[in-house]
Structure formats: C-alpha cells, structure tokens
Image (cartoon, coloured by chain):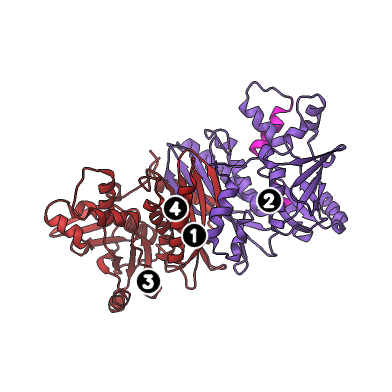
Chain colours: A red, B purple
Amino acid sequence: MISETNIIHNYLKNLTFNNKSSLKLNDDVYYDVNKKIIFSTDTFEEGTHFVKSSNPNKFVKKIFRSAVSDILCKGSRPMVYFLSLSAPKITHKWLNSFCNELKKESKKYGLFLGGGDTVKSKKLSISISVIGETKTKPILRSTARKNDDIYVTGNLGDSFLGLVALKNKTFSIKFKKFFINLYEAPNLPLKFSKHIYKFATSSTDVSDGVIRDLENICSASKCGAKLFFSKIPFSKQALELSRTKKINLYKIFSKGDDYQILFTSNSKNRKLIKFISKKNNTKVSRIGVITSKNGVQMKNGDKIDNLSSIKSGYIHTF
Amino acid sequence: MISETNIIHNYLKNLTFNNKSSLKLNDDVYYDVNKKIIFSTDTFEEGTHFVKSSNPNKFVKKIFRSAVSDILCKGSRPMVYFLSLSAPKITHKWLNSFCNELKKESKKYGLFLGGGDTVKSKKLSISISVIGETKTKPILRSTARKNDDIYVTGNLGDSFLGLVALKNKTFSIKFKKFFINLYEAPNLPLKFSKHIYKFATSSTDVSDGVIRDLENICSASKCGAKLFFSKIPFSKQALELSRTKKINLYKIFSKGDDYQILFTSNSKNRKLIKFISKKNNTKVSRIGVITSKNGVQMKNGDKIDNLSSIKSGYIHTF
C-alpha cells in the first residue's frame, strides 16, 4: 500500500526541479509570482467524491465548491475554471441539468468556463482546474509560526453526517435533510475569505478532515499544533444529536468534506478577526495554538490525545 | 448519441459567458492576453488513448507529448504542467518508471511539474494540464484566410499503423517497430514550432486526424479547404508498404495521433517556410489551400472527394 503523501514526497516532488512556483508540492496550489496567478486541480469520481452521478443537482455544487475552495482559502480570487469530463453514455436531460448547475455555481463565485476536454469513459470522472488571481501573495501552508492561534470558519462534521445519512438509508436521524444538504452543497465562507490576507499567517481548506489538513500545515511549516476539543465548532443540530447520544462528536469532527477555512494568525489579531467575522456574518472559532512539538494534540477535558489523520481523516492509498 | 462537438457548442459554450479568453471554445487552448498565458488540459484513459498501462515506457511519452503539442502548435512555450493521476493499485516499480519517463520528457520539452492531484480509482486515467507562455499572440484556429496555403509537418499515418500493429498481434508487417515507436513516442516538431509565429495565419496539432483537425480550423475560421492527395506526406516505410499493396494510404492518412502541426499561411511566405524547414531539419509539406466553400475536399488524381471526419477521424460520442 502506497499513500498519497508517499507518492507526492518520494516521487512527484522530484519532478518539480525545485522550481519555486511548485511550492515543493507542500500546498494545494501552484503560485506564479510573475504572472500573479495561482492554480489548483481536483479530480472527482463517482463513489469516492460523491455518491451518485445520475442527478447533477446532487453533486455539481459539491465538486465545484470543493475546487473553488482551494483558491478562496488562499485569500485569492477564483478567475476561470476548466472542465475535463470523462463520461459514459449521457442524455440531453443530464447535460442540461449538469450545465445549469455549473452556470449557477460559476455565477455565484464569479468564474467563467475557459476550456477543457471531453472523453468517453466507463465511469463518470470530472476534473476541475481553477486559475485564481493574486493581488497579494497567497496565504500558504508553510508559513504558520509558533504560538499562532488556530482558527476555523463554520462548523465541522455536518457534511460527514450527511454522507452517512445518504449511504445508510436505514440511518434515520433528526435533521437528516439539513446534514445531507451540507454534504451536497457545502457553505463556503466566500465573503470572509476576501479578508483573510489581512491576518492569516497560513491557511488551507478543510477537505480531508481538520486533523489531516492541520497536519499538512504543520508538516509544511515544521511545527506542531494543540487543539481544544471544547472550542471545536458544531452546528446546533449536531449538538442536539450528541446530547441525545445519537452521535459521538469526538468521532465525527475530523471526517472531512467541510470546505471551511482553517487558518493561523498571530494572537495580536484576535480583535480584528472577531470584528471581520461579525461584519461578514461568518462564524469563526479559535480552536487551538501552534506549538514547536511535532504532531497534532487534542486537549479533551483533562486528557491530552495524540491525534493522527490515519484514523480520522481521508487519505488515498494505492 | 451525442457528439463531443454537440456538447461543446450546445452546452459548454454557454458557460464561458462570452469571455474572450475562452476563444468561444473554438480552440484547444484558453488564452489570457493580460497574463500572457495559454492553458490546455487533456485526459487520457487506458484503452482509449493508449493501449495498456502496465508499462509506463509504453504510454508516458505519448500522453505527455500530446499535452505539450497543444501549446507548441500555437507557437507558444510550454512552461509548467500539472498531473491528475487516477489510479488503481500501483507498485513502487511502476511509480519509479512512470516518474522517470515524466522526468525525461519534461526535461526534453523544458517544463516542470507544478502540482496536481492523486485519486484512487478502478482504472488508470491521467489528466495533464499545461500552462504556456505567450510572447506573441498565439496562433489560433479561427484566423485562416481564403487562398492561404495549408501545410503539415512530418508524415501522416505512421502512428495509426503502429496502433494497428499493437492491437492485432497477427498483423505482421515490415517496419512494425518503426510504426509502433511513432505511436508510442510521436516526434513533435519542437524546433520548427518556435518559428511558426513568423508566418502561420492559423494552426492546430494533428491529433484527431488531419481532416477532423482541418475541419476545426475551417469551422472556426468560417471557410473550407481543398487538399491534394499527391502532396500528403508519408514515410518511406508507409510508401513501401503501399507499393506492395499491404496498406491503402488513402484509408490511413487521416486516422489521427500524428501530433504534427497543421497550419495555414499566405502564399507570399512559401520561400521563408522552405528556408526555416530546411534550417530546422523539419519536413514541411504544402498539402492544400483554404477555400470559401464549406467543408474539406480532396483532389485525388482527377477525382474530387468530399471528406468527412465522421468516417475518417476520431470523435468521442456519448
């Protein structure tokens, strides 16, 4: 078994020829300082990244926002996207619905379609690449500093509960629609993202789960992190399910697909962040602190756990 | 059945919001005049774009050159590439060989890896996106003019014969290795491509077959074309097979995968093109002329045939 991380660091990094714009493949983006662009590409497959392809209403928002999220979380402006569509037999009805969804999404986030490729395939697979414009230097993963505060926007875990509800038809919980909607159409912190260049020292989006994504920051920035479980943000709905013992919050907070922004900032910015959070009507929670130790720790009551994304997040293995 | 062309023109074009950089999806590239970049993306699947994935030596050159070719044929410089790797279980041996091939290819064509994505999948599928730098305006498909000469570099049909030889183990022909090699490692006209901005009015690469690719120029430029079969360039090897009646050249010249450059130019540039062709040791053949009629015609001896890519080239249908 070979992990994604192993492939990137032991094989692919070597192919960058140490060009600075590749950011040592430590980030989710490519950054060309001369052209003032950043670039990100994501591939989405039926069964892995979304449940079913039959109804575009149910997956286009998710994959489009996931692609745009990589640019937004860097404090950059998504400019243009490219679509590679590998598809089996499709109908005009499906195409109509697929394109209508894309149209609405791209209008919402201010992008246009720049080009792409269409290929006949046995299974639906879609790659979305996005070029973003950077007025200021994008916020990278590699620039967190010791004692920085760690923040996350929105709530964690709702999207995962949506996925569970979708996959297990017998899993009947209250607020089922609420969770499924957040899985199929994650709420990106668009307005707030436009301000993060003012205070964030490092950032990423929460796609593979907050532990895994925080590990990415720590490994790129050569630092560790300590989280406080009491500060992890959950929705009212998730909290209510937890109170009635339907779910264990400690088991779901780092399952991924939240597409919120995880960032670090110097403690002197606390007031500013509160102010901007309020002004943009965006929930922002201070959940931990950057340390000089390796790895991610979690303070949960009196206990301190060493966390590992291998158990709690999503990593592709081959 | 829905064709690729139908999908592009009736569905996807609508998503460009008429942004000029999208070039109405009439070209294989996106062109941002302010950033001075062009961008192209291609997806390659086992069984469709290459025969087998088990040995990277046998397919990496082909797909890499196919991706780079889109930029070269525009007279632009390929700068950086991005790799989306959807793969089933892979071994360290395979990864080593895959990355070694990529390293050699990217050195040869002057690119570096900028980033990408890795996804676990049931079948190998690889997307390669390339950003190219444009010092001068890239040569588009939409700018051919009536009475322009039509040119193509290299030879046509060899790559197709290689594919036939690979697929039919019983198909025993002389020069089998020669043809297979051109299928697996097409010879891009790299040196010559650096000069085409000096004389080409329009251009494309020959990927889907010369008729289909010429139709793309004609439809984008709102013109027609007349080809002369006697001028179509073939290798010595293909000509010898044809003399011994093993193959019919008229049936193979437009089967695609040649990755040569097809371009148009004003007749006043004939001497210049001959000179640059000689200086760069690149075979360049004048094969026809742009007309005001619709469609592509072929003069074959005394006969004039109306050609259609539906029979002779490669079009994805869904």
Q: Is residue B10 above or below residue B231?
A: below
Q: Earlier in the sequence, mark 1 or mark 3?
A: 1
The alpha-carbon separation of the residues under discs 2 and 1 comes to: 26 Å
Q: Mark 1 falls within which chain?
A: A
Q: Secondary structure at mark 1?
A: strand
Q: Toward the viewer: B176 or A170? A: A170
- Residue A130 is labelled as 1
Residues at marks 2 and 4, common chain?
Answer: no
Asked whether residue B276 is drawn in magenta, I would say no
Q: Quadrant of the N terminus of chain A?
A: top left
Report crowding for label 4: few under 14, some 14 to 19, many 20 or more residues within 10 A (C-alpha). Answer: some
Q: Secondary structure at mark 2?
A: helix
Q: Secondary structure at mark 4?
A: helix
Q: Earlier in the sequence, mark 4 or mark 1?
A: 4
On the question of residue B147 being in view, the answer is yes
Q: Toward the viewer: B164 or A179? A: A179
Return the x and y of residue B199 as percentages of the image width and height. 79, 59
Q: Mark 2 falls within which chain?
A: B
Report the magenta residues as a range.
B174-191
Residue at image mark 2: B216
Q: Look at the numbered discs 4 and 1 and tell me whether their residues touch, using CB distance below 8 Å.
A: no
Residue at image mark 4: A97
Q: Amino acid at mark 3?
A: Lys
Residues at marks 4 and 3, common chain?
Answer: yes
Return the x and y of residue A182 as percentages of the image width and height. 30, 57
